[in-house]
Amino acid sequence: MKINDIALLSLAAALVIIGTHQTITVGIVAAYPIFMLSLVLLFWYKFRQNKRREQEQEHEGKSGKKENKRK
């Protein structure tokens, strides 16, 4: 996990906590944008994670093909 991913996940968790506090004190209307921003960050984190996994699989596939040709 890279530092950017850690930052995205931590920021999303912090926004959920802040949104919960805002919901209790002010109401859901004031907290709605905070929750939506948190969801955007979670989706972005998951997108980056899936993209990295696909790149690793492509890299393993290419190195596996080279090994098969050598045998």
Image: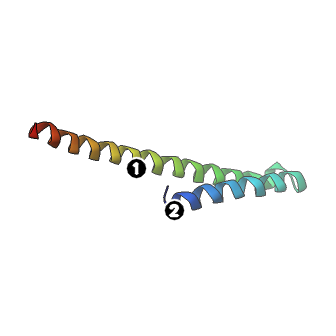
Q: Residue at x 52, y 46 (%)?
A: 46
Q: For the residue carrying disc 1, how many other residues have a C-alpha within 10 Å: few (<14), some (14-19), or many (20+)? A: few
Q: Which residue is mark 2?
A: 4
The image quarter containing residue 21 is bottom right
Residue 63 in the image, given as x and y percentages of width and height: 21, 45
Please tell me which residue lies in front, 63 or 43.
63
Q: For the residue carrying disc 2, how many other residues have a C-alpha within 10 Å: few (<14), some (14-19), or many (20+)? A: few
Instruction: Indicate the secondary structure of the residue bearing disc 1.
Output: helix
Instruction: Indicate the secondary structure of the residue bearing disc 2.
Output: helix
Which quadrant, please, contains the C terminus? top left
The image quarter containing residue 62 is top left
The numbered mark, 2 or 1, whose residue comes first in the sequence reads: 2
Q: Residue furthest left?
A: 70
Q: Is residue 7 left or right of residue 50?
A: right
Question: Label for residue 10?
Answer: none
Please tell me which residue lies in front, 6 or 15.
6
User: Is the Cβ of the residue at disc 2 closer than 8 Å to that at disc 1?
Assistant: no
Residue 48 in the image, given as x and y percentages of width and height: 46, 51
Question: Label for residue 52?
Answer: 1
Q: Residue at x 64, y 58 (%)?
A: 10
As shown in the figure, which amino acid type bears the numbered disc 1?
A: Arg
As shown in the figure, which amino acid type bears the numbered disc 2?
A: Asn
Identify the coloring. Answer: rainbow
